Image (cartoon, rainbow, N blue to C red):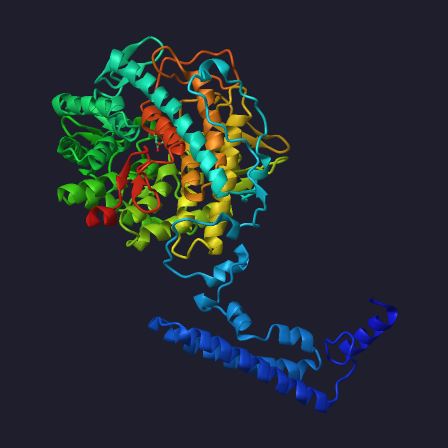
Amino acid sequence: MFNRNNKSSLQINRRRGTSSRGGGVCSPFRRLILTLLLIAIALTSGLVSLFVLTENPDESQAGNVQTLLRHVKDRAVNVANQARHRGTNTAATSASASPVDAANHAHHPHPLLRTTTESAGNAADVTVPGQVHDKIDLGRYDTPPTQAYPYPLVPVAADYNIHQQYTVAGGKRYTEYTTGGTPYLNTDSIQEQSDHTARSRRTFVKAAMQHAWDGYVKFAFGQDEVKPVSGTGSQNWGGQGITLVDSLDTLWLMGMKEEFWAARDWVRDHLSHDNVGSVSVFETTIRDLGGLLAAYDWSGDKVFLTKAQDLGNRLLKAFDDTVTGIPHGQVNLKNGQNGNIGWAGGNVIVAEFGTLQIENRYLSKMTGQEDFAKKTEHVFEILNKMSPANGLFPYFFRNQPKEGNMPEFANDKLTFGAMADSVYEYMLKIWIQGGKKEPMYREMYDKAIEGMHNELLQTSTPSGLTYIADKNSGKIDHKMDHLVCFMGGLLALGAYTDPLGLESSRAQRDLRTAKALTYTCYQMYARMNTGISAEYVQFHPGKDLEIGRGAPHYLLRPEAVESFFILNQLTGDPVYREWGWEVFESIEKYCRTKYAYGALSNVQDTAGKPRDSMESFFLAETLKYLYLLQDPDTEVDILNKHVFNTEAHPMRIFPVIDAE
Ligand code: DMJ
């Protein structure tokens, strides 16, 4: 018990320069005995640890043993010094006097001395650089969850009619995920239930693909898009068969092989870029070139590679006549003429010229033609030279400056949404594609993510939703595009591949942001009447998120379900499958048409009819991610084997290609 007398003796001791609470002043003799005792304890425990380490047959530990010996010695000296200076504070001092403790508080402790109960904060100090993480025990990285996963995981009956039966509840479901923690234990039995449920759900996603594909085949086979309401075709991409090429690997991954080979025959016999006029270099690269390359990577059919090489050479003309090495935004596939987009004020867009590299590097790797890789990699060398202190790039560049041969920034708008998004994605993914051997890309990524945390990351009120705002001329704009929702998945992938290790404070920060942001994206769906997200949302104090002005539409975009898939594959948390299933049910209910699926004009209008348009990325990305999310048996492995381009086309990474 703390009483008046204790208090006064504490005060007295402090005045006399000691920190002892109850013992009074020590005699010199007692102090000497205590000092000797402490040195003996420290040396004994040091020798025990040394014995344990030298028993380890691993020769590489020798240097670490020496380090440990140094720690033991230093610690013993410290303990003696502390005892000399502090008098009788024996209990507290001896409790922290072992060399194990000393090593845990040192800057680079021996990995053998790591404990399993370290918090995220001090875990940074025990990182082993270059560590590879396969499966992660979530409980180690957050406050360890104790509660079993509480939501029912029920398989869907084969005769379930989503279109008729689903009613979206609306609202703030799963709030315990708001801050990016790990609220529940994922046990073997929960995993089994989730997988079992997923296997029944994936058949419905595949049926959705079948429905959309059938409509395309029936009304628009070989054309760019099918109009899902009127059942007609359209050549709005210059006649590149964009839906067909963009869908190839989705057909493959869903096991729709007959449809895949029929589409391959069309590519072989009819796909030609001879008469395609001016196109977007970015869109054609990510959809058409990326689609062909992934189809080649999965099937091994050379038809796709030959067509891809021809297309790649036409696209390279975008690099002609530019002194900076930054390509033009548009190129005519027929005659090679190039130019920048008028509506961008004659500028080029960082998300466009910064999102060509995965495809072109793969093309070089498979054909041996080096200029695809060289020209597109050079773009990143320039970006690296121009990189601002915070690693964040404004989205407009002048690739034809009035003087000199360096590009210039043409505005000061920062965003992880439209016009900048995928340049950050490619910083990380190019590094992964190359086997993590080109540090410049990873460093650019880490710098940008640091900048994002410092300058753009926000929290809403009242719910505390995490979002990445835009910044215009130094001023925060509290909005977030649906496009930004890819960042949840990207941040998680960055954390799991962090060279500092997943346990480092940087990776833990990024993983937490990844999960929190993905919850916000889920809320962008859950809070709407249709259960579907708007194109962008705005955040207002006290009101969380509202539909952005003039943006109540949904274009069948994939970014939120992309993050659900990545987070589920990396963390194993079944919650992402639940969210993905809700989104899928909403799409079935509100976007399905007689012939395919259509965009929505207003996500709050439950009586609204889908529009007569379906972008190819709905088949290439949205349905693919929804399917993979519910496919426990997929061969896709984003941690060890594959990299997805920004249009969801997975290709093997280079070390895997080299090994096979
Ligand atoms: C797709 O073409 C790609 O995902 C791109 O990176 C962003 N926009 C669309 C999907 O929304």
Q: Where is the N terminus found, in terms of image quarters?
A: bottom right
Q: Position of residue 138 (x, y in %)?
A: 49, 48
649 relative to 391 in the view: left or right: left
Q: Where is residue 622 in the image (x, y as percent from the top left)?
A: 37, 27
307 relative to 78 in the view: left or right: left
The residue lying furthest to the right in this view is: 4
Give the residue drawn at x 49%, y 55%.
505
Q: Quadrant of residue 151?
A: top right
User: Residue 145, can we see it?
Assistant: yes
Between 1 and 266, the one lying in front of the other is: 1
Between 144 and 530, the one lying in front of the other is: 144
Ligand 1 quadrant assignment = top left
Between 385 and 185, the one lying in front of the other is: 185
* Number of disc labels: 0
Q: Quadrant of residue 598?
A: top left
89 relative to 49 in the view: left or right: right
Between 333 and 127, the one lying in front of the other is: 127
User: Residue 405, can we see it?
Assistant: no
Give the residue drawn at x 45%, y 74%.
52
Q: Is residue 413 above or below residue 548?
A: below
Q: Is residue 220 above or below residue 464?
A: above
Give the residue drawn at x 21%, y 20%.
239
Q: Quadrant of residue 43?
A: bottom right
Q: In this view, does 204 lie above or below 338?
A: above
Q: Position of residue 213 (x, y in %)?
A: 29, 18
The residue lying furthest to the top in this view is: 230
Q: Position of residue 508 (x, y in %)?
A: 49, 51
360 relative to 620 in the view: left or right: left
